[in-house]
Image (cartoon, rainbow, N blue to C red):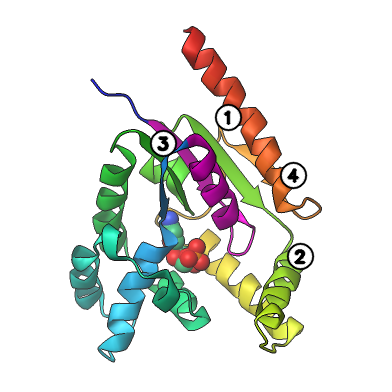
Amino acid sequence: MTSTFTIAIDGPAGAGKGTLARRLADHYRLNLLDTGLTYRAVAYALIQHALPLDNVSAAETAARQVDLAKLDRAVLSAHAVGEAASKVAVFPTVRRILVEKQRAFAMTPPGAVLDGRDIGTVVCPDADIKLYVTASAEVRAKRRLAEIESIGGTANFTEILADIVRRDERDMGRADSPLKPAADAHLLDTSEMAIEAAFLAAMAIIDEVMAKRNKA
Ligand code: DC
């Protein structure tokens, strides 16, 4: 049997889990999947066809067509697509189709870092490492504003904060696979921690688990 190593990273929008996931995948030479992009791809397909976001059968069809090798971050990263993704992500049948693809990805050697909302709880409950990355809504809104301004855009802090709070409520409040830390997740609060410090903290946790595993 070929063994794989899985790192599950969950947390709310804007907590820094994407950057952390990329750093960890590079460092440990693992595959990387931003599962948010899979929900975004479904939402994007509906938007492109001018279909309502509550058209479940169209969302299921779009979910079946999602190809993990062809997720285009540049196209899918638009703010409106993230909002729409959070809406299509409430449908259990859509989730089941995407989760199956995500699990197959995780099981491909040498293993993977996956980030999302339900990785440690639903997609990879047996992950070797589970991290729950969070930060206060205000800090996340400030970071988002700085990001927009750094590329020459303008935005309103109060509106961004309201958006973040609304998205948290939807992602944490849905009946199927709500965002919550797995019982065995390590919590990383990045409110007062730079991403480099979060990376070092995560590495310390992972190295300890790897050392124990190599001894066993
Ligand atoms: O991480 P993101 O902002 O790209 O995710 C977009 C939306 O997709 C998020 O608000 C909820 C949904 N999502 C989910 O339900 N489960 C995941 N594992 C990843 C994302």
Residue 29's place in the image compared with 17, above or below, is above
**Residue 78 position within the rendered picture, expressed as x and y whole percent measured from the top left:** 48, 80
Query: Within 10 Å of the Cα at label 3, are there few (<14), some (14-19), or many (20+) other Cα atoms?
Result: some
Mark found first going from the N terminus, 3 or 4? 3
- Per the image, label 2 sits on a secondary structure element best described as helix
Q: CA distance from mark 3 to mark 4?
A: 26 Å
Q: Quadrant of residue 19?
A: bottom right
Depth-wise, is mark 2 or mark 3 nearer the camera?
2
Q: Give residue 139's mark.
A: 2
Query: Within 10 Å of the Cα at label 1, are there few (<14), some (14-19), or many (20+) other Cα atoms?
Result: some
Is residue 26 part of the magenta span, yes or no?
A: yes
Q: Give residue 197's mark.
A: 4
The N terminus: image quadrant:
top left
Residue 196's place in the image compared with 139, above or below, is above
Q: Quadrant of residue 167?
A: bottom right
Q: Type of residue at label 1? A: Ile
